[in-house]
Image (spheres, rainbow, N blue to C red):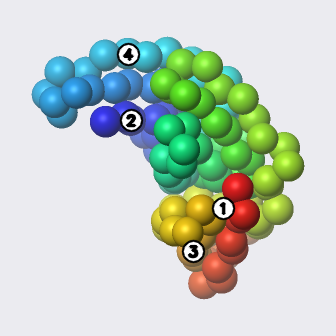
Amino acid sequence: MYIFGGAGSNATNDVWSSVNGSDWTLVTPSASWSSRYGHQTVIFENKIILFGGNQEPNIIMGNDLWISSFGENWEENTLINSFTGRYDFSSVLFNNKIYIFAGICEGWIRTNDIWVSYY
């Protein structure tokens, strides 16, 4: 189990892991991706994929996508970032595709669109 950043107006980019949900280990205090909240993650082919979110401190609605094997070292995938930047959205991995639903975009506009990534 992992926790990635978060915390609203004091957003972070730390990564924590736990095998039981009670005892947590700090994987990294500062991942390669910027501090953010309202982002999403999926696990695909034993890789953690983190994307989107409200990036602090500049309040940027993210459309970036980061990949890691164990949460410590991250690499940005610049080939797959065509969805409109957003936070507080939903996502699911289905049939080897990442689906992104709704969220809040630039200008605090709520959207109800759906994006599909063929990762």
Verify CB contact (< 8 Å) between mark 4 and mark 3: no
**Residue 26, disc:** 4
Q: Which mark is residue 3?
A: 2
**Looking at the picture, does residue 101 appear above or below residue 34?**
below
In primary-sequence order, the first of circles 2 and 1 is 2
Considering the numbered disc 1 on the image, is that residue within a helix, a strand or a loop?
strand
What residue do we see at 67% from left, 38% from top? 66
Q: Nearer the viewer, residue 58 or 68?
A: 68
Give the CA distance from mark 3 to mark 1. 10 Å
Task: Identify the residue under disc 3.
Answer: 101
> Separation of disc 2 and disc 1 at Cα?
19 Å
Q: Indicate the amino acid at tag 2.
A: Ile
- The label nearer to you, 1 versus 4, is 4
Measured in 3D between alpha carbons, the distance from the residue under mark 1 to the one under mark 4, in whole angstroms, is 27 Å
- Where 74 falls versus 58 (above or below)? above
Residue 2 x %, y %: 37, 34
One can see residue 60 in this view:
no
The mark that comes first in sequence, 1 or 4, is 4
Q: Which residue is mark 1?
A: 86
Which is more N-terminal, label 3 or label 4?
4
- Say if mark 1 contacts mark 4, CB within 8 Å: no
- 26 horizontally vs 79: left or right: left
Q: Comparing marks 3 and 1, which lies closer to the viewer?
A: 3
- Camera-near label (2 vs 1) is 2
Residue lying at 74% horizontally and 47% vertically, measured from the top left: 64
Q: Earlier in the sequence, mark 3 or mark 2?
A: 2
Q: Is residue 29 left or right of residue 55?
A: left
Q: Position of residue 45 (x, y in %)?
A: 54, 44
Residue under the point 60% across and 84% down: 112
How far, Cα to Cα, is label 2 from label 4? 10 Å
Decide which of tag 2 and tag 4 comes sooner along the chain. 2
